[in-house]
Amino acid sequence: MTQSTDVVELLKAQHTRIRDLLDEVAAAKGEERKQHFQDLVRLLAVHETAEEEVVHPFARKNIDGGEQIVKDRIQEEENAKEVLSRLDDMDTDSPQFMTQFKELRKDVLAHAEAEEKYEFAQFKQVADRGKLENMARAVKAAEAVAPTRPHPGTDTAVKNLAVGPVASVVDRTRDAIRKAIG
Ligand SMILES: [Fe+2]
Ligand SMILES: [Fe+2]
């Protein structure tokens, strides 16, 4: 788990891991691609849930033009979720999967970039320290639900989870966040 208490750093580290996983899915084949894709789906579920629970609500209220910025980001997240659900029951080695996956990759990369540029970049100027630390706690608690750097072959329980239980990952993430921020 990332050690930082800086929420922007934590979110950016998750973005980096998401970018890496997108590359790993594209580069791999067969069982390996399937596993990377499952890791990606879990991390996206955890990451976006933390953003929805604490980061976007904070941004909406506290940054310049927050209402519109957050509205746009949530729209992008909705679009990505839609593509993700289309990918859900596809054979990861089929040409259809790769076509949709490329679309997802483009959307997710643009989304992460827009968050960093328009949303997170403003946090330092507006946030009080307590709020930032609280958000960092929430993001870390969320991260613990789906480790962002699983060790290949050692974390069988995580590896064996199919893409299916995304809803349960989201539920557990919400619980963990709510416990962490009380
Ligand atoms: Fe997001
Ligand atoms: Fe994000």
Image: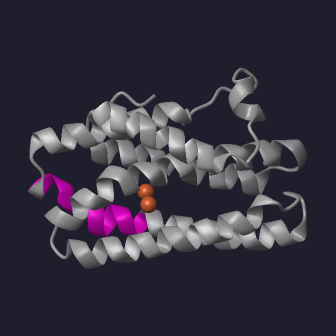
Residue at position x 55%, y 32% in the image: 147
Residue at position x 71%, y 20% in the image: 154
Give yes or no for residue 55 being in the magenta stretch.
no
Q: Tell me if residue 46 comes above or below residue 52 in the rendering.
A: above
Using residue 26 as the reference point, say whether residue 75 is left or right of it: left
Residue at position x 48%, y 40% in the image: 173
Q: Is residue 120 visible?
A: no
Q: Tell me if residue 6 comes above or below residue 103 in the rendering.
A: above
- Provide residue 116's location: percent of width, then percent of height: 34, 61
Q: Tell me if residue 155 comes above or below residue 81 in the rendering.
A: above
Majority SS type along the magenta span? helix
Ligand 2 is found in the corner quadrant, namely bottom left
Task: Choose top left, top right, bottom left or bottom right for residue 175.
Answer: top left
Q: Quadrant of the C terminus?
A: top left
Q: Is residue 83 visible?
A: yes
Using residue 109 as the reference point, say whether residue 71 is left or right of it: left
Residue at position x 17%, y 64% in the image: 61
Using residue 34 as the reference point, say whether residue 18 is left or right of it: left
* Front position in the image: 118 or 133: 133
**Magenta-tinted stretch:** 113-125
Give yes or no for residue 118 being in the magenta stretch.
yes
